[in-house]
Image: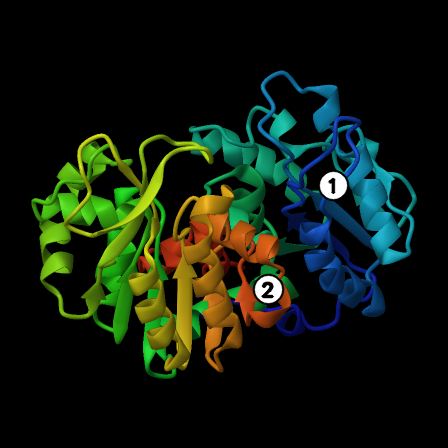
Amino acid sequence: MNLKTLEDMGDLSGKRVFVRVDFNVPLDDEGNVRDDKRIQHAVPTFKYLLEHGVSKIVLASHLGRPKNNEVNLQTDKVAAKLAELLGEPVTKADDWGEGGLTEDKIVMLENIRFHKAEKSKDEAERDAFGKQLASLADVFVNEAFSNSHRKHASMTSIPKFIPGCVGLGVEKEVGAIQKAISDPEHPLVAVIGGLKADKLKAIHNLLGSADRILVAGALATNLLKAKGHEIGTSKSDDEGMEEMADVAKEIIASDKVQLPTDFVVADDFSETANIKTVAADGIEPGWMALDIGPESAESFAKQISEAKTVLWFGPIGVFEMAPFATGTKLIGEAIANSEAVSIVGGGDSAGAVKKLGLEEEMTLVSTGGGASLEMIEGKELPALKVLQNNL
């Protein structure tokens, strides 16, 4: 993927720069930032711009899923946290127009999703808003990888009107994921978990490059069901599996794909349920698989230890509940202790890594589960594609 970087933009001195970030961070009951990792992730890009003499930085982010421009989803507290981390004043604007910009060098706009055109299904409406935003700057920077699979005005419309590039964080994420897909060090082991059958697209795309694909989570029981096995009351995505039936058959037939050989099952979705370990073909009616069993965990961990590249997308089990967290813990530790280049998809996988305290042991913990998964599936991300066609 041939994307312009900050360095490619040349002399930035005196220019106004619009930076689209993803500061969709968790907030406490009082609206304070509870976890500032996403904001920290963008700080190097802001420092680069300041060090290269830009005259102004206008930044925008979405925050939550506003329905009625809720006060608790305004970006004031997020702007304050950026100022704290950056050590520079950051002023909050109340709208998205030139009139809201102050004389300060760094200005954060109001929650971009408060404007109805941001997520409009009408491209012309999105582009009109994008043109308005583009008028605030000379250069556009995409530092929101996690939102790059969305056709939103601030992601795909702004760079239709001003030159654009990716920020340092997006450059790093895209580069790492792209190399893992197109030019990995072998053996390449992919660990794919979660529930949704649409992850079968990622598995299918990896059949050509991966040496081993280890399937866990509810996705594994979905595939066992497709093979004709009883899965009891385990979660299933029947509609998705029906749509992906032909792909599922190919995956099941591949000798690169390994399903768990045993599971930890329970008679209720609860930490206090009755629990036992059974063979993969021994799940009884009324019981549900909530984690891989010890035999599977040992086998998966051994293969991970021999890998040179590891991709991990989706939880191994219900790691939020202690009785069903062992598989996730063992797999996470195996990846952390390996010498492999390790890329962890965002979402639940990133949450598991964080809970285990293993973030620093991974090569890359992606900021965007949906965006990174779509790259693994071989899809083009709209917000990156528009930059390839940029002015």
Q: How far apart are marks 2 and 1 (CA)?
A: 19 Å
- The answer to whether residue 382 is visible is no
Left or right of 107: which side holds 96?
Answer: left
Mark 1 — residue? 34
57 or 137: nearer the viewer: 57
| Protein image colouring | rainbow
The quadrant in which residue 228 appears is: top left
318 or 242: nearer the viewer: 318
> What amino acid type is highlighted by mark number 2?
Leu
9 or 316: nearer the viewer: 316
> What amino acid type is highlighted by mark number 1?
Arg
The quadrant in which residue 289 appears is: top left
Q: Residue at horizontal 77%, vertical 59%?
A: 46
Mark 2 — residue? 358
Q: In this view, does 158 lie above or below 15?
A: above
Left or right of 26: which side holds 93?
Answer: right
- The answer to whether residue 20 is visible is yes
Question: Element under label 1?
Answer: loop
